[in-house]
Image (cartoon, rainbow, N blue to C red):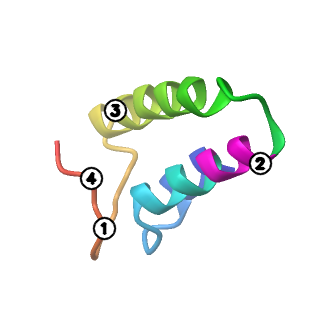
Amino acid sequence: MTIAELISFPEIPPKVSINVALDLAKRFSTDNSPAFINGMLDGIYTELQTQNLIQKTGRGLIEK
């Protein structure tokens, strides 16, 4: 879900997409899951950016 939002929904800031995934992990998984998921999504986000697959506009963008 988060990857689809990163690629296909330019109006949703990456921070929001990632935070929603982390909130879901906190609620429905183990205590270690949010850190693992955050690491995975950060790596995926970075890779998508290097491939120019993310075209975001507006507020809340992640500064790199």
The earlier-in-sequence mark between 2 and 1 is 2
Q: Residue 60 magenta-drawn?
A: no
* Residue bearing mark 3: 46
In front of the other: label 1 or label 3?
Answer: 1
Main SS category, magenta section = helix
* Amino acid bearing label 1: Gly
Amino acid type at mark 2: Arg
How far from the left and from the top, in percent, is residue 39?
47, 25
Label 1 belongs to which residue?
A: 60
Q: Residue at x 69, y 50 (%)?
A: 1
For marks 2 and 3, give the one nearer the viewer: 2
- Badge 3 element: helix
From this viewpoint, which residue is outermost toward the right? 28
Please name which of the two marks, 2 or 1, marks the residue nearer to the observer. 2
Which residue is denoted by mark 4 in the rendering?
Answer: 62
Q: Which residue is mark 2?
A: 27
* Residue positioned most to the left: 64
Residue 60 in which image quadrant = bottom left
Under mark 3, the amino acid is: Thr
Amino acid carrying label 4: it is Ile
Which quarter of the image is occupied by the C terminus?
top left
Residue at the spot 80% in from the left edge and 34% down from the top edge: 29
